[in-house]
Image (tube, rainbow, N blue to C red):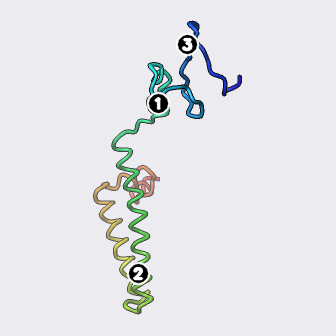
Amino acid sequence: MDESKVVEDEKGALKWRKVLYLDQGVPDNYVDSTFLDELQKNVYIRTYEYWNVVKETGVVTQQLSSICIFVVMFIFMSNQQTDPITILGCSLVVTALGFLLYDWIDQGQWRKEKHRSCECLSDN
């Protein structure tokens, strides 16, 4: 079909089409009654559960925090304000405290499920 041809309806009147490149004899801001017939709302919408979004946001925040800490430590070492041994020592202490806190909150449940506790080994 040739797009430049004007379409007429059954009464012989010019039929308005949703194209901008044709002069249809109406103002540029004219809207026909059929304009919204093809409107589709929320065609490809995805719904998310709130707590899953919060969990994934925590992962992204953790990654950004790790990058910021790396950059700050690099600048400190570059300016000779600290040495790598101090950073290593602090990292070891914080990691050990974090694991102990996690294990205390978890009550050792993860180790029991994975059969990694001393109690499970002694049962065999």
Q: Which residue is mark 1?
A: 27
Amino acid type of disc 3?
Ala
Q: Which residue is mark 3?
A: 13
**Residue 96's spot in the image, x, y percent?**
36, 71
Q: Is residue 18 left or right of residue 94?
A: right
**Residue 37's spot in the image, x, y percent?**
48, 20
Of labels 2 and 3, the one closer to you:
3
Residue 98 or residue 104, whichever sits in front: 98
Outermost residue to the right: 1
Q: Residue at x 53, y 21 (%)?
A: 16
Q: Is residue 32 left or right of residue 2?
A: left
Quadrant for the N terminus, please. Answer: top right
How far separated are the C-alphas under marks 1 and 3?
Answer: 17 Å
Q: Reading the chain from its start, which is encountered first: label 2 or label 3?
A: 3
Q: Reading the chain from its start, which is encountered first: label 1 or label 3?
A: 3
Residue 41 or residue 23, whichever sits in front: 23
Residue 68 or residue 41, whichever sits in front: 41
Amino acid type of disc 2?
Met
Q: Residues within 10 Å of mark 2 (few under 14, many from 20)?
A: some
Q: Which residue is mark 2?
A: 73
Q: Is residue 20 left or right of residue 41?
A: right
How far separated are the C-alphas under marks 1 and 2?
Answer: 64 Å
Asked if 24 appears above or below 49 in the picture, the reply is above
Secondary element at image label 1: loop
